């Protein structure tokens, strides 16, 4: 049985709800799996939580301001370069922390933390039921996949955020799905993806992926919050097909394990060196098909 200090915010909310419904303290304690004394102390307002546990915040507000200044000097620096300069300024931290500090605002960080807290006790069996999906762009110029820029909304046209490049490099956009059981068929996307075209992808590629990996068993589908994904008509499509969609925090591609598989495919393509788009597509499909279930279950840090 858990002590009062171990009660989570969710448990406390449930206690308050059940009390309003007229449940006894004994019934409430049995319902949520804690001691009756913990319920009593919470209801009487005498409960005192423990000191905050968990990992201490590894950077200060001053350190975060230093990082923003480093980013503003050159918006095209890699994550490794940013981390190196931040370390030289006296802030020892990881690449993941740099990513969170640069790309996420406080509200988004809180949503990621809430999401991770809700999922932290999920079992292997529960995660195995998730069908992860994503789109990725593959270019012919493997020596340089294109510079990335660190910018906020509204800074798209700032001179500091612009850089000359090849105007139309040959490339393909690919949609794929994976689970702990392996990978599904790929979809090579032509043109922009809107709600209608995305639903076609779901119909002709996601459903076959689910059939291949889960058969008649239930599964939970994951995708990010792209406009085509979060459109009302797309939500209706999932409802009509009886498919549960995993809630997902914004700006969080690093939480999706399929990113590991895209990286595996792109590293293999650097060795294949295709010369035409047809060769590129064939190489992508071959690399994707060679991925094993063991490679599909790489664990990732959630927050």
Image: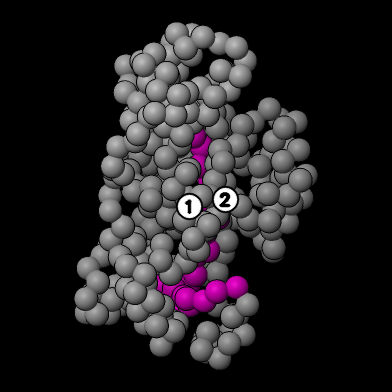
Quarter residue 206 falls in: top right
Q: Is residue 215 something one can see in this rendering?
A: no
Decide if residue 5 is in sight here: yes
- Region in magenta: 127-153
* Pointer 1 or 2: first along the chain: 1
Characterize the local packing of mark 2: few (<14), some (14-19) or many (20 or more) Cα atoms within 10 angstroms: many
Residue 271: image location, x then y, percent: 33, 65
| Residue under numbered circle 1 | 110
Q: Is mark 1 on a helix, strand or loop?
A: helix
- Whether residue 148 is situated above or below residue 46 in the rendered picture: below
Residue at 50% x, 63% y is: 105
Q: Which secondary structure lies at badge 2?
A: loop
Q: Where is residue 29 in the image (x, y as percent from the top left)?
A: 43, 14
Q: Is residue 166 above or below residue 193?
A: below
Q: Which of 53 and 81 is in front in this view?
A: 53
Q: Does the magenta stretch include residue 149?
A: yes
Q: How far apart are marks 1 and 2 (CA)?
A: 17 Å
Residue at x-position 35% and y-position 67%:
98
């Amino acid at each position: 049985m858990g002590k009062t200090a171990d009660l989570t915010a969710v448990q406390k909310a449930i206690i308050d709800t059940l009390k309003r419904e007229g449940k006894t303290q004994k019934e409430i304690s049995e319902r949520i799996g804690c001691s009756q004394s913990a319920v009593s102390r919470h209801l009487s307002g005498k409960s005192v939580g423990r000191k905050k546990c968990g990992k201490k915040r590894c950077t200060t507000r001053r350190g975060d301001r230093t990082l923003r200044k480093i980013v503003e000097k050159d918006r095209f620096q890699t994550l490794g370069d940013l981390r190196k300069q931040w370390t030289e300024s006296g802030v020892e931290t990881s690449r993941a922390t740099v990513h969170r500090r640069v790309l996420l605002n406080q509200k988004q960080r809180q949503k990621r933390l809430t999401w991770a807290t809700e999922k932290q006790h999920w079992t292997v069996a529960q995660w195995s039921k998730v069908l992860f999906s994503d789109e990725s762009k593959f270019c012919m110029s493997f020596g340089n996949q294109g510079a990335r820029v660190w910018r906020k909304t509204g800074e798209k046209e700032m001179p500091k955020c612009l850089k000359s490049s090849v105007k139309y490099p040959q490339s393909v956009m690919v949609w794929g799905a994976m689970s702990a059981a392996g990978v599904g068929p790929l979809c090579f996307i032509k043109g922009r993806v809107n709600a209608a075209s995305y639903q076609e992808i779901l119909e002709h590629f996601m459903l076959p992926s689910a059939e291949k990996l889960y058969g008649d068993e239930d599964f939970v589908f994951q995708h990010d919050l792209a406009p085509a994904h979060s459109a009302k008509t797309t939500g209706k499509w999932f409802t009509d097909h009886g498919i549960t969609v995993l809630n997902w925090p914004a700006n969080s591609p690093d939480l999706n394990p399929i990113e590991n598989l895209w990286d595996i495919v792109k590293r293999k393509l650097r060795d294949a060196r295709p010369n035409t788009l047809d060769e590129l597509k064939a190489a992508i499909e071959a690399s994707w098909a060679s991925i094993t279930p063991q490679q599909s279950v790489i664990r990732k840090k959630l927050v």
